[in-house]
Image: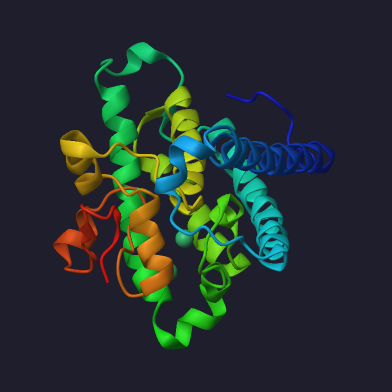
């Protein structure tokens, strides 16, 4: 389905456009999330803030710097994926009737689970002492994480992260809007998990939710304790491989 002509000029325009969109998405969403949780709802969320000390300005500057570089890499992969889709190489479909309607949410879950599995194992690999300093150290420079940490990765780590969704959608049929939903979930989840404030419900329902879905408290343990909680969206791989650091439900903060 040739929609546009892929000459150098068009590719460059698409790259710049996508780069700007990704950077704005990062700045606007992280900014809005910070403003909502730490300013507007500060009083009601006060006890759920994981660390009340301020995040050093120098750290925030570095996080934004690496996140902007990440945006450039994601833009390159985005344009590449758009080209693959345009040429008909991907399994992405546009006609909703191509697959049953129940398949749409299932396909989203399936892609997220494959991405989660991939990230869990790549993440553990990146924690190997010889690999760590080249791929993953930049992300762990932030111990007290913030909304700006969400896309702060060394370019080598970003490369590993950026290639998985294009690879999955070469084989797994996903509706075009489901792809969009997956990208939105990626952004929201990365921001929630690094923001340093637990927004997921507490109580019985919250305990069930927290046992399955990774939130700020769970990922904060990874940044502080280092050798636990490697997962991206789901706690499953950490449970299965015995790398989950249990949370103390009474304190709603990580048990040490
Ligand atoms: Zn890590
Ligand atoms: Zn992190």
Q: Nearer the viewer, residue 196 or 228?
A: 196
Q: Residue furthest right?
A: 9
Say which quarter of the image contains residue 122. Answer: bottom left
Toward the viewer: 207 or 236? 207
Q: Position of residue 28 (x, y in %)?
A: 67, 36
Q: Quadrant of the C terminus?
A: bottom left
The reply, left or right, for residue 46 in relation to residue 64 is left
Q: Residue at x 20, y 38 (%)?
A: 203
Q: Is residue 246 above or below residue 26?
A: below
Q: Residue drawn 28% across and 39% down?
A: 110
Which quarter of the frame holds ligand 1?
A: bottom left
Residue furthest to the top in view is 97
Residue 4 position in % (x across, y down): 71, 27
| Residue at screen point 47% across, 82% down | 131
Q: Is residue 225 visible?
A: yes
Q: Does residue 252 appear left or right of residue 220 in this picture?
A: left
């Amino acid at each position: 389905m040739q929609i546009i002509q892929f000459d150098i000029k068009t590719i460059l325009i698409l790259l710049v456009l996508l780069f700007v969109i990704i950077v704005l998405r990062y700045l606007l969403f992280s900014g809005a999330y910070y403003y909502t949780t730490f300013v507007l709802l500060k009083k009601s969320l006060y006890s759920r803030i994981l660390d009340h000390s301020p995040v050093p300005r120098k750290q925030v500057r570095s996080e934004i710097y690496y996140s902007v570089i990440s945006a450039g890499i994601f833009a390159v992969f985005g344009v590449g994926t758009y080209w693959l889709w345009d040429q008909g190489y991907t399994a992405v479909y546009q006609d909703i009737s191509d697959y049953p309607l129940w398949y749409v949410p299932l396909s989203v879950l399936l892609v997220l689970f494959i991405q989660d599995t991939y990230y869990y194992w790549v993440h553990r690999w990146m924690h190997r002492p010889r690999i760590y300093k080249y791929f993953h150290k930049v992300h762990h420079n932030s111990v007290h994480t913030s909304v700006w940490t969400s896309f702060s990765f060394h370019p080598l780590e970003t490369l590993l992260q950026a290639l998985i969704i294009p690879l999955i959608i070469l084989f797994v049929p996903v509706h075009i809007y489901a792809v969009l939903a997956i990208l939105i979930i990626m952004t929201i989840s990365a921001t929630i998990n690094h923001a340093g404030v637990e927004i997921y419900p507490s109580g019985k329902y919250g305990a069930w939710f927290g046992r399955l879905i990774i939130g700020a408290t769970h990922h904060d343990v990874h940044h502080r304790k280092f050798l636990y909680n490697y997962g991206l969206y789901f706690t499953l791989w950490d449970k299965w491989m015995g790398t989950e650091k249990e949370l103390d439900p009474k304190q709603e903060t990580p048990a040490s």
